[in-house]
Image: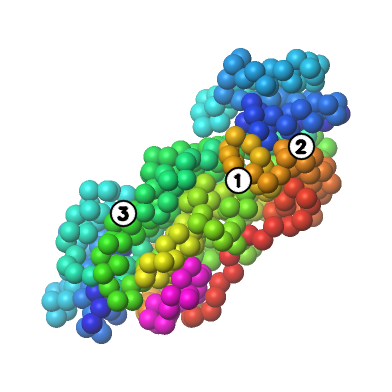
Amino acid sequence: MATVVITGASRGIGLELVRQYAADGDHVFALCRNPKTSDKLKAVADRYSRHVTTLPLEVTDAAQVAEVARRIGDVPVDILINNAGINPPFEKQTFLDMDLDVWRETFEIMTIAPFRIGQTFLDKLLKAKQPKLVTISSELGSAIWQTPVLIAYGSAKAALNRTWRAVAMELKDKDVIVLPIHPGLVKTDMSGAYGLLEVEESVSGVRNVIARATMADSGKFYQWDGQIHPW
Amino acid sequence: MSTVVITGASRGLGLELVRQYAETGDRVYALCRTPAKADKLKRLAEHARGNITIVACDVVNEAEINAAVRAVEGPVDILINNAGIAGPENQTFANMDFDGWRESLEVMAIGPLRVGRAFFPALKKAKTPKLVTITSQLGASTWPGPGILAYSSAKAAVNRVMRGASIELKDENVIFVLIHPGHVRTDMGGPSAALTAEESASGVRKVIAGVTQADSGKFYKWNGDIHPW
C-alpha cells in the first residue's frame, strides 16, 4: 500500500489518478483548489473513503504548499504526482498575440509550482523506500511537435522537462526517481476537441510507467505507453 | 548594407556583435538598458562612421521596447535577441531563488518574444529578414549536469518559443534561428571559457548570413553545426 499525493485532483487526469490509485488500495492525498465544491472528486472520495483524503491547494501559493505539507504530516510519501495544469485559449498563446500575464501564470503553475511542491515534499519522499517524484508533462514541450504550438503551454512544459532532467541528477544520490511523463493527448476538459486517448487508458499507462520505474529511468522523458519521448 | 538590431549590446557578445556588424558597414541599432553607463559601447559608437545608434531598451519593459521600435528607421534585416542574465546565485533544487527564476524567464524567454513581435512588422519589410535568438547549450536536454536551473529552463523555454513561432509563421518571410554562441569568455561566461567574444560573434554572424527559409526553426551552434534539442 503506497501513499500517493496528487495535485490538480478535481478533474481530468488528476481525478482519474486518484480513482485508480484508491481503487488499488493505496492511500491518496487528493489536492485541488476547492475540494468542497469539486463534485466529481467528492464522489470518488466518498466511494473510496478509507483511501482518499482531499485537501485544498492552490499550487502557486507558497504558503498553501507549506500548509498542505504540514497537514499531511510527517509521513512517508511514495509517489508525488505534480499534475495540476492549465492550457490557456489558443488565441492567447500565439507568437504575435501572446497574453503575457497568461504566459506568466502558465510558468507559475506548470514550471515553478511543481518544483516548489517537489522541494517541499522531499522530506516525506525520502522517508519512502523507493520514492517517485512525478510531473505530468506533455509532448508539446518537445521540440519535435510540428503543428503551430501553444507557445505558453509548450514553453512551460519545455522548461519543466529541462528542469526535472537536471533535478534528477541532483537527486541521484538521494535515490529519488524523477519522472516527467507525457500522458498522451487525453480527452479531458483541457484538451477539448483534440483529445485522442481515453483518460482511463492514459492513467493506467502512467501508473504503470511509475510502478516499473527504477533509478535508471530517473530523468528520462517517458510517455504513458512506456515509450521514451524525444526531448 | 543591412539594418541590424541587437539587444544586450553594452558588453560581452552583444557588444562584439555591434562592433563586427558596424565594421562591415551595416546600420546597427545597439539596444541596452542604461546607455549612460555603457562606456565601451559609447566609445564604439563615437569611433564608428555614424552607423551605430544606441537605444535605451530593457527587454522586460514594454514601453521601452515600443520606443526602440519607433527609433529604428526602415526595414530590419536582422534582429538579434542577445540580452541575457546568468540568473540568481541559488538555482538548484536544494536552494532556489524563485524571484530570480522568474526574472530569468522574463528576460530570456518572454523578452525575446516581446522584442521579436514588436519588431515583426519592420522585419517583414526586409527582403530576407532574420529573427535570431542567442540561446545556450544549457537549454538542451543533452547538458550533462545538474544546477543552473533558472538559466537552463529559460533557455529551454525560449527554444520552444522560437521553434513554435517558426511553425506558426512559416508563411511569413521571416527566418527564425536559435544560436548557441559557445561558452564565451565574457563577464557572464567567465574567464575560463574557451571562446573569445570575437570568435563567437564571428561564427554567429556567419550562421546568420547563411540561413535560408528552409533553416527556420533550427538550433545552431556558433560554428554552423546543428545542436541537438
Q: Which residues are magenta?
A: B206-222
The residue at 17%/67% (across/down) is B73
Query: What's the distance in space between the residues labelled 2 and 1, CA to CA?
Result: 17 Å
Query: What's the distance in space between the residues labelled 3 and 2, CA to CA?
Result: 45 Å
Residue A71, can we see it? no
| Secondary structure type for disc 1 | helix
**Is A200 above or below relative to A73?**
below
Q: Nearer the viewer, mark 3 or mark 1?
A: 1
The residue at 69%/17% (across/down) is A42
Looking at the rendered structure, the kind of residue marked 2 is: Glu
| Secondary structure type for disc 3 | loop
Mark closest to the chain's N terminus, 2 or 1: 1
Which residue position holds label 1? A194
10 Å crowding of disc 1: few (<14), some (14-19), many (20+) = few
Looking at the rendered structure, the kind of residue marked 3 is: Val
| Chain of the residue where label 2 is placed in the rendered structure | A
| Chain of the residue where label 3 is placed in the rendered structure | B
Which residue position holds label 3? B59
Q: Nearer the viewer, mark 2 or mark 1?
A: 1
**Is A60 above or below relative to B102?**
above
Residue A228, can we see it? yes
